[in-house]
Amino acid sequence: MTTRTLPLHLTKRAKRALMFNHSIPGLVLIIAGVASLKEGWHEHSWIDLLGLIAGLLLVVSLVRELKAKDEHSHKKIAWFDVLAGIVIMLEGYHKLHPGEWFQPGSVLMFVGALLFFIGLFHSKLPTVRQLKCTAEGFTVRIRPIYSFSDKWANIKSFSLDKNTLLIRKTDDSVEKRSLRKIENRDEVLKVLTEELNAFLSKTPESA
């Protein structure tokens, strides 16, 4: 059995939620920038001004994403995110206090670095969500940091109960995995069932 993959597509609701979360750093930058500039111009006000501009760009980027019909039409690099990430890291650096590990400055630098890399690898993120089937078993990766997997030898059947994937094991236990955020969950069930049947047809018990 060769490796078989199926891209997982988010539902419209899940994509909107993801985009909303994505806009939060932009709103924070706008609020922080306006608040700092209201206090008057000082040595580091140019950073606040850059933060305000980056925040506005992020919000504009969000609006453009919401209006886009094709989820695969994104550019390879999300420059707005990259710019915002750099600005947030700069702002965090100027708020660092020597000798303290956990502080607002270090948190800002971490968030900035995260946003920077998300923007840099923007086109790669959708391909992370996928179903991967091999000769031994399968892996379903719904988020970059969350996946579940099993071996065909442990499974009796697959089924869907609304938005939940039911995995019936050979010991008659049932494992439940939510596919609520996945638009093409019917395709997921179809591919899993086909690959399981292909595996079972080659086992000595089914011969």
Image (cartoon, rainbow, N blue to C red):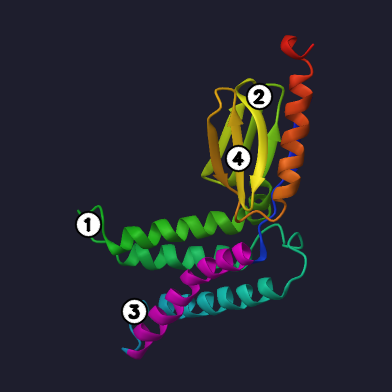
Label 1 vs label 2: CA separation?
54 Å
Label 2 vs label 4: CA separation?
14 Å
Could you tell which of marks 4 and 1 lies nearer the N-terminus? 1
Which one is in front, 145 or 190?
190
Which one is in front, 24 or 204?
204
Q: Is mark 4 on a helix, strand or loop?
A: strand
Could you tell which of marks 3 and 2 lies nearer the N-terminus? 3
Position of 156 relative to 45 (above/below): above
The amino acid type of the residue labelled 2 equals Trp
Task: Examine the structure image and report whether residue 119 is included in the region drawn in magenta.
Answer: no
Q: What element carries label 3?
A: loop
Q: Is mark 2 on a helix, strand or loop?
A: helix
**Rendered residue at 69%/35% (across/down):** 132
Residue 78 at x, y percent in the picture: 64, 63
The amino acid type of the residue labelled 1 equals Pro
Disc 2 to disc 4: CB gap under 8 Å: no
| Crowding at mark 3 (Cα within 10 Å: few <14, some 14-19, many 20+) | few
Residue marked by disc 2: 152
Position of 110 relative to 187 (above/below): below
Could you tell which of marks 4 and 3 lies nearer the N-terminus? 3
The amino acid type of the residue labelled 4 equals Leu
Residue marked by disc 1: 98
Residue marked by disc 4: 166
| Crowding at mark 1 (Cα within 10 Å: few <14, some 14-19, many 20+) | few
Q: What predominant SS class does the magenta segment belong to?
A: helix
Position of 124 relative to 43 (above/below): above
The amino acid type of the residue labelled 3 equals Glu
Span colored in magenta: 13-38
Q: How many marks?
A: 4
Q: Residue 43 carries which label?
A: 3
| Crowding at mark 2 (Cα within 10 Å: few <14, some 14-19, many 20+) | many
